[in-house]
Every structure is written in structure tokens, then in C-alpha cells.
């Protein structure tokens, strides 16, 4: 069963840090990507079971918006990504994150 993907893009670093922290605490998910998005925004991506990703993304959005000056630019959830999506986007489980994988 492929792991769902959830991503949150924020304006500012404190908001993405709060979102990442809340996501990994709220659900059984693995943080697979963090980086800069367009216009200097930040993005964080997680993977896990669909139900866990939904809960984690919701918690991440709430945490980012509660952060002083935090703003969520966008977010998305892909419940069942196809192989070509996984191959093109940097959302693969790497050696660095494999030890934190839940399933």
C-alpha cells in the first residue's frame, strides 16, 4: 500500500518549524522533505497512512497559523500517489528518514 503524502507551504521559517513539529507529533507519519518553495516560502512534506496524514496536516496548519506572523500559503494531501509522482517529487523515503518510518 503506497503511503499518502501531505505538504504544507508557509511564509516564514517559524511557521514551517511549528507545522513540522505538530505534524510528527499528531500522527504516525514520517517527515520526508523540508526545503524552500517559490518566493522564499518554506515547505515540509510528510508520508504515512491516509488517516494519519490527514490528522497530521490539520495539526500542522493549526500550529503554523498560531505562530506569530505565521501564514500558510498552501497545503495539499495526495492519498495514493502513483509511482511517477514519487519518482519526480522529492518525497521518497531516504536512508536518513528510513529509521523513522512507521510502516
Image (cartoon, rainbow, N blue to C red):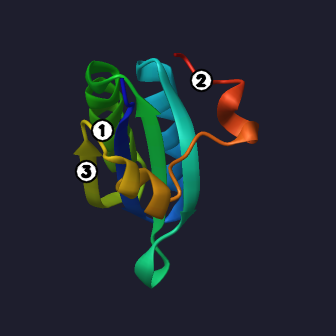
- Find the distance from the CA under tag 3 to the CA under tag 2: 21 Å
- Find the distance from the CA under tag 2 to the CA under tag 1: 24 Å
Q: Is residue 64 above or below residue 56?
A: below
Q: Is residue 86 above or below residue 30?
A: below
Nearer the observer, 22 or 94: 94
Task: Tell me what residue is drawn at x 26 percent, y 44 percent.
Answer: 78
Question: Percent position (x, y) of residue 57?
Answer: 32, 36
> SS of the residue at dot 3?
strand
| Direction from residue 97 to residue 37 in the image, left or right | left
Task: Tell me what residue is drawn at x 50 percent, y 22 percent.
Answer: 25
The earlier-in-sequence mark between 3 and 2 is 3
The earlier-in-sequence mark between 1 and 3 is 1
Give the number of the mark in front: 3 or 2.
2
Give the number of the mark in front: 1 or 3.
3
Q: In the drawing, what numbered circle is on residue 43?
A: none
- Find the distance from the CA under tag 1 to the CA under tag 3: 14 Å
The earlier-in-sequence mark between 2 and 1 is 1
- The residue carrying mark 2 is 101
> SS of the residue at dot 2?
loop
**Residue 92 makes an appearance in the image:** yes
Task: Tell me what residue is drawn at x 54 percent, y 30 percent.
Answer: 30
Question: Percent position (x, y) of residue 82?
Answer: 31, 47
Question: Percent position (x, y) of residue 8?
Answer: 36, 52
Question: Percent position (x, y) of residue 64?
Answer: 38, 47
Q: Is residue 47 above or below residue 52?
A: below
- The residue carrying mark 3 is 76
Q: Please report contact status of discs 2 and 1: CB closer than 8 Å, yes or no.
A: no
Instruction: Locate residue 38: give its quadrant.
Output: bottom left
Which residue appears farthest toward the front when viewing the image? 83
- The residue carrying mark 1 is 62
Q: Is residue 86 above or below residue 20?
A: below
Amino acid at each position: 500500500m503506497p503511503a499518502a503524502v501531505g505538504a504544507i507551504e508557509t511564509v516564514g521559517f517559524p511557521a514551517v518549524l511549528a507545522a513540522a513539529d505538530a505534524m510528527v507529533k499528531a500522527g504516525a507519519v514520517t517527515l520526508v522533505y523540508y526545503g524552500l518553495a517559490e518566493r522564499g516560502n518554506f515547505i515540509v512534506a510528510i508520508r504515512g497512512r491516509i488517516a494519519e496524514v490527514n490528522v497530521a496536516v490539520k495539526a500542522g496548519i493549526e500550529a503554523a497559523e498560531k505562530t506569530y506572523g505565521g501564514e500558510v500559503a498552501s497545503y495539499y494531501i495526495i492519498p495514493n500517489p502513483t509511482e511517477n509522482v514519487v519518482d519526480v517529487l522529492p518525497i521518497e523515503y531516504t536512508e536518513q528518514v528510513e529509521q523513522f518510518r512507521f510502516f
